[in-house]
């Protein structure tokens, strides 16, 4: 899984600064930037993220890479405490 980044408005490949521009790509990028992380419930914005969406609903659930890492570390710590050993 690769980390994705969303460009800032006005960046070379980012959405237009004017939100009324009407470009489909700009609207989609703005929508993705406003999605809330499934773990911390903060907007994705331009921070690194993973696409955690179900296959039938692409790009509908995003998580911050840092939140996903914390979740994975917590899961591994719990498994160590319980003595559970298996790969993810």
Image (tube, rainbow, N blue to C red):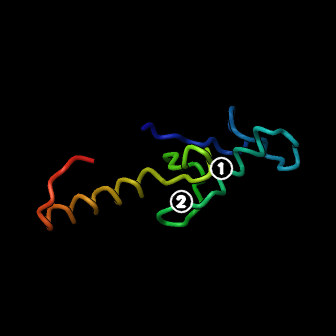
Q: Secondary structure at mark 2?
A: loop
Q: Quadrant of residue 10?
A: top right
The answer to which quarter of the image holds residue 5 is top right
Residue 68: percent from left, percent from top: 40, 54
Residue drawn at x 28%, y 61% is: 75
72 vs 66, left or right, is left
Residue designated by label 1: 32
Disc 1 element = helix
Residue drawn at x 32%, y 56% as measured from the top left: 72
Residue 49 pos. (x, y %): 50, 48
Tell whether 7 sits left or right of 39.
Answer: right
Q: Earlier in the sequence, mark 2 or mark 1?
A: 1
Q: Residue at x 47, y 63 (%)?
A: 39
How crowded pointer 2 is (Cα within 10 Å; few <14, some 14-19, many 20+) is rated as many
What label sits on residue 37 in the rendered view?
Answer: 2
Q: Extreme front residue here? A: 56
Of 3 and 7, the residue lying toward us: 3
Say how many tags the image has.
2
Mark sitting on residue 8 = none
Q: Is residue 34 left or right of residue 74?
A: right
> How far, Cα to Cα, is label 2 from label 1?
10 Å
Image coordinates of residue 22 in percent, x first then y, are 88, 42
């Amino acid at each position: 899984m690769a980390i994705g980044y969303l460009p800032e408005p006005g960046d070379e490949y980012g959405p237009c600064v004017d939100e009324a521009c009407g470009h489909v790509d700009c609207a989609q990028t703005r929508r993705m930037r406003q999605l809330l992380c499934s773990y911390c419930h903060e907007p994705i914005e331009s921070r690194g993220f993973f696409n955690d969406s179900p296959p039938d609903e692409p790009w509908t659930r995003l998580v911050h890479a840092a939140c996903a890492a914390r979740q994975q570390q917590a899961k591994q710590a719990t498994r160590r405490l319980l003595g559970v050993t298996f790969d993810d």
